Image (spheres, rainbow, N blue to C red):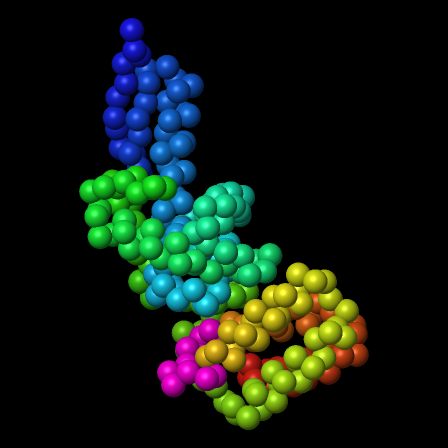
Amino acid sequence: MPRPHILFREMGFCYCADIKDDLIVMKGSMSELSEKRFQFLHRLYELSGGNQNQLFEERDIGEELNLTSEQSDIIGQYLKGEDLIKYVSRRKIAITHNGVVEIENALLAPDEPTAYFPPVNIINIHHMEGSQIQQGTIDSTQAGTFEIGNQKQLSEFIELLKDKLPELEISADDKSEIEADVATIEIQMKSNRPKTGFIKESLLSIKRILEGASGAVIATGLLKYLLPLLGG
């Protein structure tokens, strides 16, 4: 005879529970995890506008959704495994074509489950109005606006950084992150409507890495060019 079960809702999540306590925990946890995966991917879709070239800090998105670092890592691993997001470096993620399709299909048919998620109508989707998250956010606080000052100076810094990058005494992960930041800046500089927030956060990411290697002569020299671009 099958065990009786109940349905109940708590904190915006739908739970299916058997009478036995250990199964209540297990089923509730699985339902909550699936919904948090959707919320995470949906937030990445909102921030990027479906642009697969825009990079974001995995843990910044997790913090917006009140996830711990460990939860963000677990969710990121799952979404990457299903080719819904990609890691450009150890810290930065971007949505994939499959991720865009998955979210848009879910929103177009909110009463239907998708291959990876339950129906949108039972999920508590978080809308973050006025969020300051941008690509590669490092600092915990941000200014709401950022103006590009001397674009010629910025271009010169980027070219110098690309030239000196092979000589920097930093990890392979940090070099990959700088390359991703540089690519983001160059894309924005070529745009007719550059997103200055993306440029700022990429510069802040580069600054943090260079400061970690500030004992080296090359890194110290690059910081002298970078700080004026940030108003420092």
- Residue 152 vertical position relative to residue 132 in the rendered view, above or below: below
Is residue 55 left or right of 130 when viewed as pictured? right
Residue 131 in sight: no
Residue 44: % across, % down: 40, 58
Q: Residue at x 31, y 30 (%)?
A: 15
Q: Would you identify the image quadrant in which residue 168 lies?
A: bottom right
Q: Would you identify the image quadrant in which residue 223 lies?
A: bottom right
Is residue 220 left or right of 42 when viewed as pictured? right
Q: Residue at x 42, y 19 (%)?
A: 22
Relative depth, front residue between 138 and 108: 108
Residue 18: % across, % down: 33, 18
Is residue 43 left or right of 157 when viewed as pictured? left
Start-end of magenta stretch: 189-199
Residue 77: % across, % down: 52, 46
Relative depth, front residue between 108 and 223: 108
Quadrant where the image shows the C terminus:
bottom right
Q: Residue at x 42, y 83 (%)?
A: 191
Quadrant where the image shows the N terminus:
top left
